[in-house]
Amino acid sequence: MKNRLIGTSVPRKEAFDKVTGRARYVDDVSFPGMIYGTTVRSKVARGRLRGIALGPGIPWDEFVVVTAKDIPGINAIHLINDDQPCLADGVINHPEEPVVLLAHPDKHLLEKARQAVVLDIDELPAVHSIEDALAKTAVVWGEDNIFKRYTIEKGDIAEAFANADVILEGHYETGAQEQLYIENNGVIASYSEEAGVTIWGSLQCPYYIQKALIPLFGVGPERARVIQLETGGGFGGKEEYPSMIASHAALLAKKAGVPVKIIYDRAEDMAATTKRHPSRTVVRAAVMRDGTVVGLDIDFAIDGGAYSTLSQVVLSRGLIHAAGPYSCPNVHILGRAVATNSPPHGAFRGFGAPQSIFALERHLDEIGKYLGIAPDEIRRRNFVKPGQTLATGQVVRDDVDMNVLLDRALEAAGWGDKKARFAVENREEGSVKRGIGLATFLHGTGFTGSGEKFLASIVGVEATADGHVRVLAASTEIGQGTNTIFAQIAGDALGVDYDVIQVGQPDTAFVPNSGPTVASRTCTIVGKLVETAALGLRQTLLGSGLLEEPYSSEQFVKACSAYVARSGELRAYAEYKQPPYIKWDEDTFKGDAYGAYSWAVYVASVKVDTLTYEATVEDFVALQEVGKVIHPTLAAGQIEGGVAQGIGWALYENVVWKNGRMANDRMTDYIMPTSVDLPPIRALFAESPYSYGPSGAKGIGELPMDGPGPAIVNAILDAVGIGIPRIPATPEVVMEAYLANTSVTRVCRATEVARG
Amino acid sequence: MKPFAYSRETGLDHALARGKEDGVRYLAGGTTLIDLMRLGVEEPSTVVDLRALPLRDIKADGDGVQIGALATNTEVAYHPLIAKAYPVLSEALLSGASPQLRNMASVGGNLLQRTRCSYFRDPSSPCNKRMAGSGCPALDGYNRSNAILGVSSSCIATHPSDMAVALLALDAVVHVRGGGGERAVPMGDFHVAPGSTPAVETALQKGEIITHVTVPASPFAQRSHYVKVRDRASYAFALSSAAVALDVSGGVVKSARVVLGGVATKPWRATEAEAELVGKPPTSMSFDAAGAAAVRGAVPRTHNAFKVELAKRTVARALRDLVGKA
Ligand SMILES: Cc1cc2nc3c(=O)[nH]c(=O)nc-3n(C[C@H](O)[C@H](O)[C@H](O)COP(=O)(O)OP(=O)(O)OC[C@H]3O[C@@H](n4cnc5c(N)ncnc54)[C@H](O)[C@@H]3O)c2cc1C
Ligand code: SF4
């Protein structure tokens, strides 16, 4: 197989439709008789629902009203534990919890009606922080507020701490973050007795929604059909949440007898839907004078909100990435996902890893500062090498040399020059100080552990009557380039032009389940299946006598078309097979957590204004080893976008909580950086092919979310000598740290271990 | 959005006649009004479009300048009569919103823009400004963007305009037309603090139209400067801003203007800060003293306490930059 398309920046498959306005998003779509739906939500964090009253002044007989009583099947959004109701029934567990659904043809009247519904709720004590959840100030979930607890053990942690020169402890926190896709959540549902439920919507995972509709309506999969429309971004925010809004629209459609559209406005989308899990991490490091970290004892906790949703999966990824790309021989990591009374937190690019990586990468700089070892040097003394093991005991098989990546990134960033220049300039008068910081990290490709094996994804390719080849997968194009890279991979596998390949619309009635569009898995895992399926189709065609090697694209198309004319159809499928070396023990968290990792070194240059305490990123270098770059422009776009989102998380995007509800639920108050706030982002790649990825590709979607947080805050440390323990490092947070003169001794407890 | 009637008037008298009717709102650039209609905060039955009225000129007026109420923020900011003679006004305008918005936004609309207090903009929440007597959830709620000066127990909403802060520093006058003829309202009297009637934000009477704004020549206009501190470099309202102007001769400040934005319920002239400057040489020490005087009497709340220190520093920085610039 020769690469003609892979490695080049072919035009995006859907670009023309998008830039000409021809692409149809859910709010562009309408059906005859369609009406609008809205959601009445709880204002309180926790309580007992005593009654629902339809207030005066509204012609209620014109409305379709749905409550929990109207649910034909099981009142739960099916995911892992099924603890989250579709509509609250009796108990309220978070603000914005959906209780009543309304539908009407007039959107304006619908909004008045929403405001007129009165929920009679007896309030109960609620929990609003990780610490309170762990301290059980109130028990709001299960017996102890803990959704899930995992541990990772490697070596002998007690021994390491007994024999280290120094023990340093640091406490780190990261805030929630809103995905802020351009297009808010939205769906249309229709219902008929014969066809069952059909959903059209803005979503990442059509089969998740189908799985949720089946028990809710008590129907079989043939009567729960989900179709993805053009989707304006997801970032994880349209992984599990669309199951909720789709269920709501479907319940209304069933009762109304006509299609129902629900589109959230920005405030509702921000306040009611999922966000990145807030976290707090305590890192205790046992260190030798030369900077070798001999023991890591990490306590990692994430706030899952009111229901368990995906928290345990987020937790496991966070846990596995907590010890970073280092060979530390003795590791103990405790991970807990806890319940609080805020809307459930959910999937968001990085999925727990950015949180735990933030803590470790910040802590390494604090250790370096304490010992007088430069940030790059302390990492060099601890990098894992091929053949050595990561925290789960996984032997590194990737051909990676972090020292080489580090050299290259520092060179590109002008590390040495800047260090010298800033040191001089920062001594001068003036309120502006500059600094440079880095983070080194890895990110696992695909589902954790045996996840991919259980998913058993399937991809199909089929020939069309006119001889084109169509990829059939449930993996969605959400702006990241799925359709384009699938066409590149299939095109190269078949040895045909880009135009020969089409990508079918994800529709559960027509495409096989290639798994969810999450976990940086689409290119590596699903892309590999596309390649395998395409090779299968090619084999059939070559075996049929209609095609002979070597062939041109035109000859291929002719042969394809002839085959379909002769045999009616030409299809090939591929099913995921786990690489043979993968061994994973879900109970002990030991073994090969991921088939492969992408490896990265990020360097941030930051300016801090000590008058206003504003920190601004002035330059950013993002270097990553990704196996193989399939599409240079798209890959750079993923990195630039991820870094921008990481900068937002690190410095700007502050979710303010008030009794479990997001208080700043609009874009004037929730500050997302604009293009003017962003530095030049220089995305650099290294390639060391992974044998189980298409042409060697590994995942890159989430990776760029991991590095910016710690690199930026480490740069602030370099600029002003202040170690910020939590992000977002808004001017208020910087001011607080500045006035408290936070330094390594505050952030960390340094114990000189007594030696007898 | 609630359905409404639309009409476009070409004569000022016609427009004024329409303005007397109930449920009428004037439309200029629409960047405030249409947003509020979408949110259901404003629900006019008729929208009268003023954009065809001949109120867009920017021209010399004696030694000063006259700016038509329909001139866009972009036109004003880049106009040769303004960019040079009134730098603080150009700078304030260009620090606001985004280029797209400035191309639509008018001078009249800018003066009349409503607060960004999130409770005001959410019709399902109480708010004394929107619904008299319903309460002020910002007092104990999320109040990071709210005011620390000019506040009352009824309302602590910030006036969001940057332009108005600069106009106040320049002693501008707002000219309005109503049924009873023309009036001239000095900028200092145009916006009013909430007191017990937060719904009343300006001296404008029902149906009146702003025709133009005049900015006089002054000894300090040319040595003027605007500093705005905000959460990001574009598309953000001021957390704190300062319009400052100095007339310095013989090494001593003869007269000064210090006006704060982003921290008060209306564009806030800090006369005590000005007093700290006048009669003294322009030094860092008097700038810091002016900063401290500017926030005297501030009432901080849970999320906006940082504004006290920030406003101080903003004033000092603006003055320092101004002197450094000259
Ligand atoms: C996203 C965003 C960010 C922004 N950022 C900033 C910022 O950083 N700084 C800042 O200062 N502003 C900012 N603004 C506000 C913007 O400057 C104002 O919306 C704009 O100036 C209003 O002018 P307009 O012509 O569009 O007014 P309109 O919306 O047309 O009118 C506003 C009000 O004034 C009335 N009106 C308009 N003209 C007249 C007249 N001649 N006589 C009588 N009544 C009249 C209307 O009836 C209406 O009630 C921002 C706005 C948005 C949407
Ligand atoms: S501060 Fe003013 S505008 Fe805001 S809620 Fe209170 S009364 Fe309303």
Image (cartoon, coloured by chain):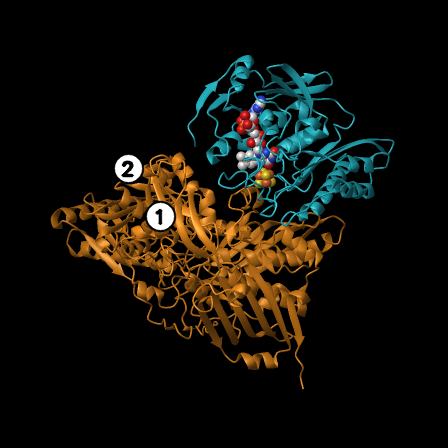
Chain colours: A orange, B cyan
Protein chain holding label 2: A
Name which residue lies at 41% across and 46% down: A40
Q: Amino acid at mark 1?
A: Thr
Mark 1: C-beta under 8 Å from nearest atom of ligand 1: no
A488 and A661: which is toward the camera: A661
Image x and y of residue A326, in percent: 52, 69
Name the quarter where the C terminus of chain A is drawn.
bottom right
Q: Quadrant of residue A315?
A: bottom left
Q: Is residue A614 left or right of residue A643?
A: right
Name which residue lies at 54% across and 78% down: A157
Q: Earlier in the sequence, mark 2 or mark 1?
A: 2
Image x and y of residue A87, in percent: 36, 52
Numbered tag placed on residue A484 in the rendering: 1
What residue does disc 2 label?
A: A31
Q: Quadrant of residue A535?
A: bottom left
B84 and A209: which is toward the camera: A209
Q: Are marks 2 and 1 in contact (CB under 8 Å)?
A: no
Quick one: SS at disc 1? helix
Q: Amino acid at mark 2?
A: Phe
Image x and y of residue B159, in percent: 63, 35
Q: Is residue B322 visible?
A: yes
Q: Nearer the viewer, mark 2 or mark 1?
A: 2
